[in-house]
Amino acid sequence: MNIIANGDAHARARKLIALAGPEQFSAADQPSSVAWLAAHLETCAACRTVAENIAGTIHGLCAIPIAAERSLVSTTQMRVRRRALELRRHRERVWLVSISCSVVTLCALLSTAALWRGFAWLGARAQLASSVWQLGFLVFCVMPALVAAILLLAKDTHLADHTGSYQG
Ligand SMILES: [Zn+2]
């Protein structure tokens, strides 16, 4: 009778150990079972060993994947954040470039229209043939690009000379 009761007690203890982890003990609304198991583990070395083994196994199983997951998660988060930042910067750059292009185009159109009117007015004032002031307008419009091209060419030749003299 006593042996059967003891066997039941061990079975009950091992069932409780298997069903409830340490965190589930506190969550489980069975303080009597918890207290009973604690009391049983105090007196029963075999069940205590079982409980320790299970706790060790659970701890070992939890520790390995969590460590791997943490590094993986942090790496992935870092990459995702970096990519998001890159994309945001790229969008900002594209937006800035498109805004600049629009502003420059608008300014060029407005100034060209104003220049055309100015040349027309000057041509009329000086009583020039329309082809003459139109040619002047064309030269005036092309001049900045020409000057810039000449300056760039000069800079390139200067740089080439400079590096050439360094090498020579
Ligand atoms: Zn026991």
Image: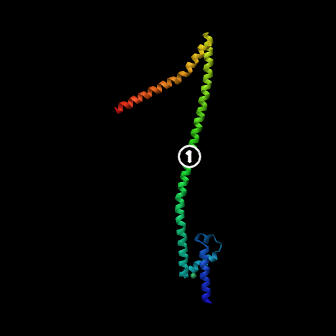
Residue that carries the numbered disc 1 in the rendered image: 85
Residue 14 placed where, x, y %? 59, 78
Residue at 56 percent of width and 39 percent of height: 93
**Could you tell whether 109 is left or right of 150 in the image?**
right
The single residue placed furthest to the top in the displayed view is 127
In the picture, measured across the screen, residue 154 lies left or right of residue 122, that is left
Crowdedness of circle 1 by 10 Å Cα count: few (<14), some, many (20+)? few
Q: Is residue 163 above or below residue 47?
A: above
Residue drawn 58% across the image and 38% down it: 94
Q: Residue furthest bottom?
A: 1
Tell me the colour scheme of the image: rainbow
Query: Residue 140: image x %, image y %?
Result: 55, 19
Ligand 1 lies in which image quarter?
Answer: bottom right
Observer-nearest residue: 164 or 17? 164
Secondary structure beneath label 1:
helix
Above or below, comparing residue 112 to residue 100 in the picture: above
> Which residue type does callout 1 highlight?
Leu
Measured as percent of width and height from the top left, residue 74 is found at 53, 56
Q: Quadrant of the C terminus?
A: top left
Residue at 55 percent across and 19 percent down: it is: 139
Rendered image quadrant of residue 92: top right
